[in-house]
Image: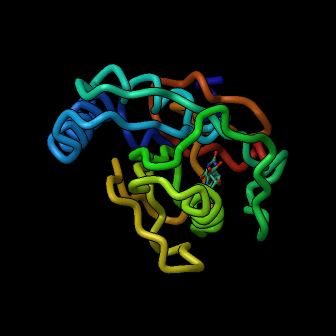
Amino acid sequence: MKNDIKQILLTKEVIEKRVQEIGQEIDQYYQNREIIIITLLDGAIVFTADLIRNLAIPLRLDCLRVSSYGNSTDPETAPRILSSLKSDVRDKHVLLVDDILDTGNTLQSVFNEVTSKQPASVRSCVFLDKPERRQNGFKADWSGFSIPDEFVVGYGLDYAGRYRQLPYVGTLKPSVYS
Ligand code: XMP
């Protein structure tokens, strides 16, 4: 698996430090108000697991499954929400957590869906952001790192379902795609 990595962009240590910082910022923002975290499966699972252990505010966790890239590296133009929420978010503070903000289509459609259920507030937190790729004006309230327009794996991000368990974020050698 390590042999498939072309370059490491973010090391385990750099990621750990940044996730701690984001946790502190979110704690400060919500001031002990309870939140419902909605994490987008499958990619955000690793980031969410680390993020919630860096949060002191009361929280509950819910998950949404959204359609992914499958075996390609191109985003689908119309992301599909494939599951429903178990929580009633009405009048609650909701924090959407995703692995990466790319075109923005996924988070925008989840944001619209959650907003229609009349929560007290909806904010978003992403581990990675590729600002060059945005197709709409979606901006995350918290973002771990901005990265260039390159397909990355590790720390929950996959290619064809693999590499999620890598503790760092890196790019793949071209031979992996052929
Ligand atoms: P959009 O384009 O809707 O995409 O903002 C968000 C989803 O696309 C996936 N994505 C990636 N997955 N490496 C990955 O493993 C990447 O570089 C990458 N870029 C986007 C991801 O599932 C995210 O939730």
Q: Could you tell whether 122 is left or right of 173 in the image? A: left
Residue 152 appears in view: yes
Res. 113 image quadrant: bottom right
Kindly give the residue lying farthest to the front in the view shown. Answer: 91
Question: Which residue is located at x 20 percent, y 33 percent?
Answer: 32
Q: Is residue 86 above or below residue 178?
A: above
Question: Which residue is located at x 65 percent, y 29 percent?
Answer: 163
* Image location (x, y in percent) of residue 1: 66, 23
Question: Which residue is located at x 46 percent, y 32 percent?
Answer: 47
Q: Could you tell whether 154 is left or right of 19 in the image? A: right
Q: Is residue 141 above or below residue 15?
A: below
Observer-nearest of 81 and 156: 81
Q: Is residue 168 above or below residue 130?
A: above
Q: Could you tell whether 90 is left or right of 10 in the image? A: right
Residue 150 appears in view: no
Q: How is the image coloured?
A: rainbow
* Image location (x, y in percent) of residue 96: 49, 47
Q: Is residue 82 above or below residue 105?
A: above
* Image location (x, y in percent) of residue 67: 78, 49
Res. 17 image quadrant: top left
Observer-nearest of 91 and 124: 91
- Numbered label tally: 0
Question: Which residue is located at x 27 percent, y 25 percent?
Answer: 54
* Image location (x, y in percent) of residue 94: 44, 46
Kindly give the residue lying farthest to the bottom in the view shown. Answer: 136
